[in-house]
Image (spheres, rainbow, N blue to C red):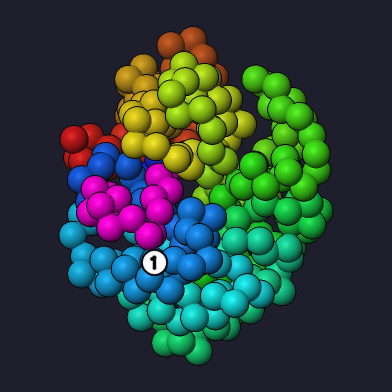
Amino acid sequence: MSFRPTRSALYMPGSNARALEKAKSLPADAVILDLEDAVSPEQKDTARRQVCAAVAAGGFGRRQVVIRINALDTPWGAEDLAAVAAAKPDAVLLPKPNDARDIERATDALRRAGAPDTLALWAMVETPLAILNLRELAGAARHAGARLTCLVLGTNDLVKETRVELDTSRTAALYWLSASVTAARAFGLMVLDGVYNNFKDLTGLSAECHQARMLGFDGKTLIHPDQIGAANEVFAPGIDEVVWARKIIAAFDIPANVGKGVITIDGKMVELLHAEMARRTVAIADVIAAQT
């Protein structure tokens, strides 16, 4: 069982050469080199060249390298996609998809641009239509030649488009969050929570990370390096969780229990499905331990 944790995914402006270099030393599981929101129109071409050159040169180590392009219907989207295909990051992040057709357009464009089969497609969930079409959007992962592997919540855009107001519990967003996790799990995708805007409020960030983990997210997108530590800590399996997972695995591996669907451990009924969950927990914990 092999896992690549994505507890923390840090957005970094593609127009900032110093930020691109710094990304190579940060403890984030993923860096999202941004050509979209963080880059002004007059800097788009420069940022594209700079980001693609940095990715092609390598040096990012274990970190997943993702490039967020501009939306395909913008003046820069098509050229972004072609350049990213040549740079060969781990994934390209597509903004503003509304349905499966947008996923198919990006997938087809990557194929025509000669992108390697290993280049994954991540998709933002940041429009009201995307929320309404989550089933078919996530379902594009089952289509022939699919590259879609991850959904990324764009909560700021959703707030803007729907005109809701978020409290500290994100009450108005709970439908978006839960629906996105459900759609991702239905089609075997990763799913990352949206950003926490107040990067100086690490207590608030930690609370939101705990909420996101409780809702089922794999990790959180971030806007500042100081936020990485909290996300990495919250989305990593805890010590007690790992100890219990190892106990479950060991119990099911006992010859007398092989083939059983239900056993008792420390007075608790444990099913085979819990063993599957335990193996995933241990696999993630082992990968994280190997990185430190």
Residue 200 location, quadrant: top left
Q: Is residue 116 left or right of residue 55?
A: right
- Any part of residue 142 in sight: no
Residue 133 location, quadrant: bottom right
Q: Is residue 177 left or right of residue 145?
A: right
In this rendered view, identify the residue nearer to me: 78 or 75.
Answer: 75
Q: Secondary structure at mark 1?
A: helix
Q: Which residues are magenta?
A: 9-23
Residue 256 location, quadrant: top left
Can you give x and y, in whole percent of width and height, for residue 144 in the image?
Answer: 59, 79
In this rendered view, identify the residue nearer to me: 65 or 274.
Answer: 65
Q: Is residue 8 above or below residue 166?
A: below
Tell me what residue is drawn at x 43 percent, y 74 percent: 45
Tell me what residue is drawn at x 61 percent, y 46 percent: 153
- Name the amino acid type tagged 1: Ala
Can you give x and y, in whole percent of width and height, for residue 279 in the image?
Answer: 39, 38
Mark 1 closeness class: few <14, some 14–19, many ≥20 residues within 10 Å: many
Residue at the spot of label 1? 47
Q: Is residue 53 above or below residue 276?
A: below
